[in-house]
Image: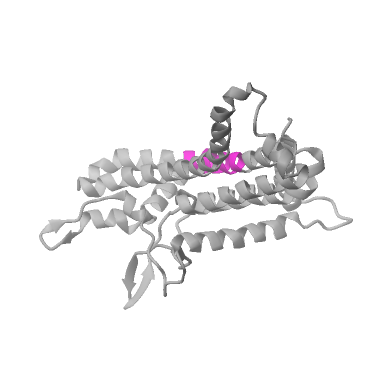
């Protein structure tokens, strides 16, 4: 019971300013609550644009950088083995992570000859996405909104998943997309690889089949990115919406329903969705790369 109360308090503390704004007024018009504003990424510091590419720092970038650091720390802390000593809990956990990445991801999707080359990629991908997903449910001072404390503006605590931003998941999927076709060409040659896309059908059907097969390759990119994006977005949106109802309707009694509902979705996302989505993304990446190396299978 104490853990549930602490979790409910954490959810309340982690409310982004998008929810708090719902109870404020600007002039005579009351600000409307819109949880989608949480995904309006504001630039931190000066704008950094290279042609059409916007390389500016925002909270999504900050979460990705933090995720990169935490992923590296996990790899260093849990994967380092001291020779001559029995495994402790830290090493056992590291071995468990390694075994999942190898047995459940790499060996299921990659041919044996390609595991040595591509295991580091799919294992890192799984761990990195898991870390970024998990950070999205920890209240962190990485919000765009600020509170003034003692004349100093400090960021509010908020929960935000970088993987609930389509540009992030699309970039991750694009890496797998590029690696898949580069490895397919390297392993089979360009002509043989592209010919493997076309099934054995009557020649009269080729004008119909070829465009569909090419479209299917690009649909992999879309499905891989949208699956992760949609699941993480939906979870955060539901949590914000349930808590936001308290402010929108200005009725504290709703907290009896809203807080337990938000807590239930929070637990579901943290316990189940975070790990499943990281696993699925890495597993599909391994399958796509493996199918490009051995297209006949």
Residue 170 locus on image (x, y percent):
51, 49
Q: Position of residue 264 (x, y in %)?
A: 42, 38
Indicate left or right for 129 with 265 as reference. right
Residue positioned most to the right: 84
The answer to whether 96 appears left or right of 209 in the picture is right
Is residue 269 placed above or below 73 in the rendered structure? above
> Residue at point 28% right, 56% down?
20
Which residue is pictured at 37% across the width and 39% down the height?
260
The residue shown at (48%, 42%) is 226
Q: Nearer the viewer, residue 266 or 194?
A: 194
Q: From the viewer's perspective, is 152 left or right of 294?
A: left
Specify the quadrant that holds the C terminus.
Answer: top right
Comparing 116 with 212, the one in front is 212
Colouring scheme, one of rainbow, by chain, secondary structure, one colour: one colour
The outermost residue toward the front is 204
Q: Nearer the viewer, residue 144 or 23?
A: 144
**Which stretch did the figure color magenta?**
268-281
- The image position of residue 241, as x and y in percent, is 32, 44
Number of labels in the image equals: 0
- Residue at (72%, 34%) from the top-left corner? 295
In this orientation, which residue lies closer to the viewer: 288 or 216? 216
Q: Quadrant of residue 41?
A: bottom left
Q: Residue 271: within the magenta?
A: yes
Residue 238 shows in the view: yes
Main secondary structure type of the part rendered in magenta: helix
Give the x, y percent position of residue 37: 32, 54
For residue 85, side relative to residue 145 (left or right): right
Q: Does the magenta run of residues contain 125? A: no
């Amino acid at each position: 019971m104490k853990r549930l109360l602490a979790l409910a308090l954490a959810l309340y503390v982690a409310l982004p300013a998008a929810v708090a704004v719902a109870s404020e007024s600007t002039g005579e018009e009351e600000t409307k609550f819109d949880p989608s504003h949480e995904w309006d990424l504001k630039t931190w510091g000066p704008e950094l644009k290279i042609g059409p590419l916007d390389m500016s720092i925002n909270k999504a970038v900050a979460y990705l950088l933090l995720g990169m650091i935490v992923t590296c720390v996990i790899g260093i802390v849990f994967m380092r083995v001291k020779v001559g000593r029995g495994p402790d809990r830290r090493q056992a956990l590291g071995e468990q992570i390694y075994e999942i990445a190898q047995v459940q991801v790499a060996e299921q999707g990659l041919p044996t000859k390609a595991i040595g080359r591509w295991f580091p990629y799919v294992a890192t991908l799984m761990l990195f996405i898991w870390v970024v997903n998990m950070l999205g449910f920890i209240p962190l001072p990485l919000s765009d909104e600020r509170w003034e404390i003692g004349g100093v503006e400090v960021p509010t605590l908020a929960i935000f998943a970088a993987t609930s931003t389509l540009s992030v998941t699309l970039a991750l999927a694009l890496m797998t997309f590029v690696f898949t076709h580069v490895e397919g060409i390297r392993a089979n040659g360009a002509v043989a690889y592209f010919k493997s896309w076309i099934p054995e059908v009557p020649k009269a059907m080729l004008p119909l089949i070829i465009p569909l097969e090419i479209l299917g390759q690009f649909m992999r990119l879309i499905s891989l990115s949208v699956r992760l994006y949609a699941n993480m977005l939906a979870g955060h949106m539901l949590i914000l919406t349930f808590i936001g109802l308290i402010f929108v309707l200005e009725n504290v009694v709703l907290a009896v329903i809203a807080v337990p509902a938000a807590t239930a979705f929070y637990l579901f996302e943290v316990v189940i969705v975070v790990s499943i989505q990281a696993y699925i993304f890495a597993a599909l990446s391994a399958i796509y790369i493996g199918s490009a190396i051995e297209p006949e299978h």
